[in-house]
Amino acid sequence: MTERQRARRRRILDASTELAAAGGFDAVQMRDVAESAEVAIGTLYRYFPSKIHLLLAVLDDQLERLRATLRERPLTERDPAERLAHTLKRAFRSHQREPRLAQAMMRALQLADASAREEFRAVTRLTTALLVEASGLPEAEAARRLSAIRVIAHTWHSSLLYWVSGNATLAEAHEDIETACRLLAGDAAPIE
């Protein structure tokens, strides 16, 4: 992408984030995004073919921001499970400040179909990479524990979905995340 294209994409993501934060999933209308980002509707559709693609890109962007924050302010915990639980609780605090944005992103993740496969996979890869980094595990150990890390990621997304939909309390979501994070302490060998 050229610098101009990156700037245009940034405006689109920022506009979408603002709309979602203000009104949730239903507030993100492509025409409103284009208007707010000051791009033609056709341009918006060239970047993002649907609202689902767009909100998955917003989720990816939010994950990148969390990753940058973790790099700027490294975790102090030594235990990998505690490091992951701290990271995911930090993310939940962000979602508490912007619950409609969290709801919009989780709904897009839930509704993603085959047309958004690449965007969905990008979010999954980034989530896994973020958690591997946050764990502080050496590369070989992280590779050996990758399945547990993926289960933690799935639990995080599921807990967030339950919380934003009002079907779990914040305390329950935190407890589920802590339980999943303890998987790193166990043997991650597959059952035969």
Image (cartoon, rainbow, N blue to C red):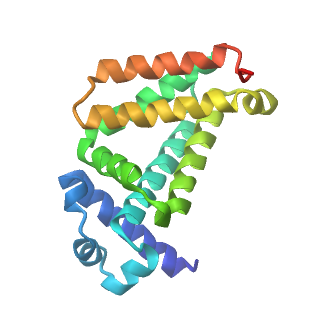
Up/down of 106 relative to 78, above or below: below
The N terminus lies in quadrant: bottom right
| 39 and 157: which is toward the camera | 157
Residue displayed at 63% across by 20% down:
80
Is residue 143 positioned above or below 119 on the image?
above
The residue depicted at 30 percent of the width and 51 percent of the height is 104
The residue sitting at 56% across, 55% down in the picture is 122
Residue 27, horizontal then vertical, whole percent: 20, 60
Q: Residue at x 36, y 86 (%)?
A: 42
Q: Position of residue 81 (x, y in %)?
A: 58, 19
Residue 11 seen:
yes
The quadrant of the image that shows the C terminus is top right
Nearer to us in this view, 143 or 83:
143
- Is 10 left, or right, of 23 in this rendering? right
The picture places residue 61, in percent across and down from the top left corner, at 46, 55
Q: Name the spot of residue 174 as percent of width and height, x first.
A: 39, 21
Image vertical order of residue 13 relative to residue 86, above or below: below
